[in-house]
Amino acid sequence: MKKSKVCKYCGEKLEITSDRCLACGKTQKNFIKRNPVFIGFIIILILILISIGIILININSKSKNNDSSEYLGLQNFLGDFWEDISISSDKLIEEYERSEKNADLNYDQVFLELTGKVKKVEELDDRVLKVELETKKNSQYKIYCRFDQDENEHYDEIKQYKQGDDITLTGNLVRDNKTITMEYCILGDWETYYAFDNTFNIDLDLDLDDVLIDARKEDKSIELNSKNIMSFDSDILDYGYTYEDIIDYISQISDDEIKITDISEKSSLKNRTITMKINEKEVSVNLSKDNTCFDESLVYQINKVLEESKSEKLLYYADMDYEDFAIVNIAYSTQSDINKLNKVISKSNLDMKQFKKDEIESI
């Protein structure tokens, strides 16, 4: 005997597997079965609302003071929505004394603007200053700030700070037990930070400038000068700069003798292609998509165009290796001047390769 059910609209008996009544014609499916797409949409919407609620709860729990309204992990997720963190050294210590865990969520490994009073200035070497800030008398926490000469145009000014002087700086906070260190610091607030750009300075490296001066002392016929050389961190693309920025500087150091126009970029799954006109000749440079380091094939392609036009000057590059990063130096010069400069570099104590013309093939 077949199992049966009753139509919920007219009462007619139906087979258990029937989805529609043959008597009244109405469907027997419930609302969920009749509207699967709509129900799916509602579920997704509910999950989104729950996620937003969790985020707002976290914001409220982490924003306990007016000086700090930002959590970097959240900012990275939602975009640049909140203002930059600004806080005093006293307020920072108060938050760490209240709860290291919560304070780390807000500040550890985060760039922020810090104000306080100087306790001591110590010169670690000829390139780095360590500034200790005053903290509460009985506090176990110490705050140190590291200023690198390469990243601070007011480096000599920082040396003159005395105990009790007010100071405002911007840098990356790192906590190790009760020691709070502000790394990659610059002197100044967020406005100064963005104007100067703490990532690196596309300009002539100070040590390299000394080498150039020494080279001119040995041979006064050298025409190469600082405006024809630029230096930058090899991870330049990791700091938000683009190849268009690099290309603009290359035009500048050549005194606009290298004219690069119509720059465009296209990306595929594995590579990206930079297309441009170098002195009116169209050129394409293929680059690895995920590589954030400077790619020398750009220099190679520019030099190819310059050599075809019989230019006396070409681009030459040399690397300088430091402990935690590498500097790329590019010079626009004649081979004669480069040879003279390389002789001085070989005698110097710089951990720097000699300038050479790029000989690699385009990727």
Image: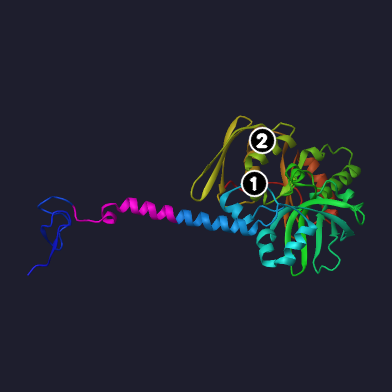
* Crowdedness near tag 1: few (<14), some (14–19) or many (≥20) residues, C-alpha within 10 Å: few
Distance from the alpha carbon under mark 1 to that under mark 2 = 29 Å
Taking 174 as reference, is 272 above or below it?
above
Q: Is 72 or 267 nearer to us in this picture?
A: 72
Can you give x and y, in whole percent of width and height, for residue 186 in the image?
79, 50
Q: Of all residues shown, which one is farthest toward the left?
A: 1
Label ID, residue 306: 2
Residue at label 1?
240
Seen at 90% across and 44% down, the residue is 218
Q: Which residues are magenta?
A: 27-46
153 horizontally vs 232: left or right: right
Can you give x and y, in whole percent of width and height, for residue 221 in the image?
87, 37
Label ID, residue 213: none
Residue type highlighted by circle 1: Gly
The quarter holding residue 333 reads top right
Seen at 27% across and 54% down, the residue is 31
